[in-house]
Image: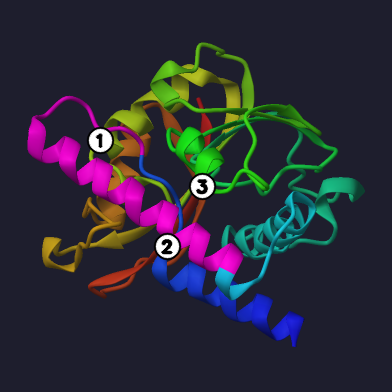
Amino acid sequence: MATRRLLTALRGIFKRGSRFPQRPSQKGEQHNHAWQEAQKYEREFWIRLLREELSITTRDQAVGFRLCEGRLHLCQFGIEWDNWMYSGHPPRITGKLLDVGSSVVSVFEKCRSVSVVAIDPSLEGLARDLPEIVVLGKINNCEYRCCRIQDVMETNFDVAWCNNVLDHTEDWQNIIHHFPRVLKKSGLLFLGMDVRGDTTLLDTGHISAFTAPEILAEVVANGFEVLWQSPVFDLPQYRFYLRAIKR
């Protein structure tokens, strides 16, 4: 029963989206209101998922759930799991990793091959809503910060991971613009997002619409070479993934 409930919850996350929006650039009161409403949407989503649907009451349970979710994410990025964090099977993710939009717990917490800086501008609110689960500061191999990528001063990350974030923010192009700044040369970028060609498909939690070709063009324009991408479909909405390297 517990396994079935976990799988159902994971399917729901991939269907609905579950990452937190970055703070928009200053474009006026309307955009600030959209960002605030999107944050509220995401906090309510996590409270409902963890407490009501999964009955998660401890941080250890939340970490275990996110590790299971991380396995599915890696498959979506075209990487076979194969116990990748311990075994060294390629493409092994190692070194210093920036998790952009980490939400309640980074999917890389307790992964021994990486040292993680996990950022999310909603972390302070989440820590108030879910104090038994969400922390700020250093724990295990992660350092959790309530901030935006624009606020990250380090420029020596080996990997940038940003999954299901861009469609939750008004300034997705600005976020992509900062990836080459924080990454080393030959650093890896993992991007996953819901793409929509029609703004009528947006809602309170998903406030930006863009297409896969627009994402690819923006990534290349910022100095990356795309190593792998998931298929591009002629559909109004679908999940799109890519891996790229900084050149």
Residue 240, image quadrant: bottom left
Q: CA distance from mark 2 to mark 1?
A: 18 Å
Answer with left or right where residue 187 lies relative to residue 18. right
Q: Residue at x 36, y 43 (%)?
A: 21
Q: Which residues are magenta?
A: 22-51
Q: Give whichever of discs 2 and 1 has the lower sequence position.
A: 2
Work out whether residue 190 can be spotted.
Answer: no
Q: Residue at x 68, y 64 (%)?
A: 56
Q: Give whichever of discs 3 and 1 has the lower sequence position.
A: 3
Q: Residue at x 14, y 64 (%)?
A: 198
For the stretch drawn in magenta, the main secondary structure is helix
Disc number for residue 17: 2
Q: Residue at x 30, y 60 (%)?
A: 195
Residue at the disc numbered 1: 171
Foreground label between 3 and 1: 3
* Amino acid type for the residue under numbered disc 3: Asp
26 vs 21: above or below = above
Answer with left or right where residue 195 lies relative to residue 200. right
* Other-residue count near label 1 (Cα within 10 Å), few / some / many at <14 / 14–19 / ≥20: some
Residue at the disc numbered 3: 129
Residue 31, image quadrant: top left
Please tell me whether residue 23 belongs to the stretch shown in magenta: yes
Q: Secondary structure at mark 3?
A: helix
* Amino acid type for the residue under numbered disc 2: Gly
Query: Which residue is more in the foreground, 210 or 38?
Result: 38
